[in-house]
Amino acid sequence: MRAHLGDQLVIESTTTGTARRDGEIVGLHHEDGTPPYDVRWSDTDEVTLVFPGPDAHIRHLEHGHPGTAHGPSAAGGHAAGTGTAAAPAPGTSAASRTPPAAPGALHHGDIGRRVAAERHRLGLSRAETAHRARMSAGYLAYLEERPADPSAATLVRLADALGTTVTALRGGGADEPPGQGRALRRPRLRDLGPEECRALLSTHGVGRVAVSAADGRPAVVPVNYEVVDDAIVFRTAPDSTPSAAVGTEVAFEVDHLDEASSQGWSVLAVGPASAVTEPDAVRRLTEGAHTTPWAGGAREMWVSIRPAHLTGRRISPADE
C-alpha cells in the first residue's frame, strides 16, 4: 500500500462491501508512501495515526483507482483498519508532511503547545489527560508534537480535562493584556549579559520608548525599530510624542512573552537620543529598513538611541 498526501483511506465493511469509514491522508511517516498514515476522518474531523488492515484501500486523488492493502504493514495489529490511534512502530519517523497552511491561517501547532503547557502545570501525564478528555494517548501525543487542526468537540473535551477554556487553548484574547496566564510553579529569574541583550534585540522589531511628552507628562510609546551599528533607530513625525526623545536620555524597552509556557524576557536600553540629519545616513536607514512604521502616515524623521546601559532579564523554569 502506497499513498500520497490528500489521498483517501477507505475502510470497507467486511459484511456488505461498502465503505464503513473514510478519511483524508494528511500525514506520511515514510517517503515511499507506505503506512502508517495520519488520517483526518470525515465523520469526526479528528486526526489519528492509522496502520491500515486488510479491510482498507487507498483512493488516489489523481489516479482514481484504489490500492488494496497488503503485506506486513497492512496487518497493523488490533487497531488496523479501525481508525483507532496507535503508537508508532519502532524507528518510525515523527516528521509530518502536512500541506503548508494558507497565509494568515492559525498556526495549529500552538494549540498543542498550550495543551502540553497546561498539562505540565497540572502535573498530568499524557495518559491521564487523554483519559480525562476521552481520547487516545496516541492522538494527544500527535496533537502536542505536530501541527494539527483538532475539532471543536476535541477542544471542548481537552479544555474541560485541563480546567481551562477553548478560547485559551486557541490562543484567543488578542485584545487582552499579555501575561494573564498562570506563573510557573518553579520560576527562575535570570539577569542577562550585554551580548545576550544585543542578540535578543536582533535586527528589528517593535519596542517601547519612554519620553517626557510636550505637556511634561511621562509617556511610553511603541515604535518599529531597527538596530544599526549598535544604535537603536526608529522613524517618527517631527511633532509626535516619540520625537520628544531627541536631545534627552531615554529608556527603550523590548520584551517577549510566551503565554503557552509562561516564560519570557525583557531588555532595557538607556542612553542619549538624537535626530539623524545627514542625508546619506537617512537614505541608508530608509533603504535598509525591514518595514515601514505600522502607524502609517508621513514619518520621515529618524531618531537614534546610543545605549549607554543595556540590561535584561529572563524568566524560565528553574530546571532549565
Image (tube, rainbow, N blue to C red):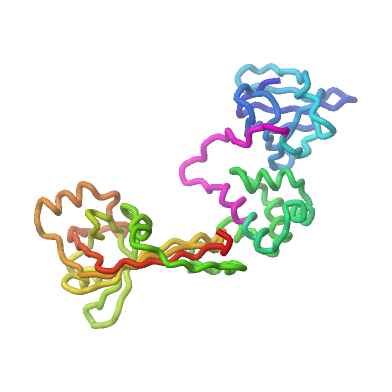
Percent across and percent down for residue 299 are: 21, 59
Left or right position of 308 against 199: left
Quadrant in the rendering for residue 237: bottom left
| Quadrant (top left, top right, bottom left, bottom right) of the N terminus | top right
Q: Is residue 228 magenta?
A: no
Which residue: 68% across, 58% down?
119
Pick whichever, 92 or 279, lies toward us: 92
Percent across and percent down for residue 218 are: 29, 79
Left or right position of 175 against 296: right
Magenta span main SS: loop
**Do we see residue 234 in this rendering?**
no
Quadrant in the rendering for residue 182: bottom right
**Do we see residue 137 in this rendering?**
yes
Which residue: 77% across, 36% down?
83
Identify whether 21 is placed above or below 167. Answer: above
| Quadrant (top left, top right, bottom left, bottom right) of the C terminus | bottom right
Percent across and percent down for residue 63 are: 63, 17
Q: Is residue 111 magenta?
A: yes
Residue sticking out furthest to the right: 15
Identify whether 145 is placed above or below 128. Answer: above
Left or right position of 146 against 200: right
Range of the magenta residues? 89-115
Percent across and percent down for residue 73 are: 75, 24
Which residue: 52% across, 37% down?
100
Left or right position of 202 against 289: right
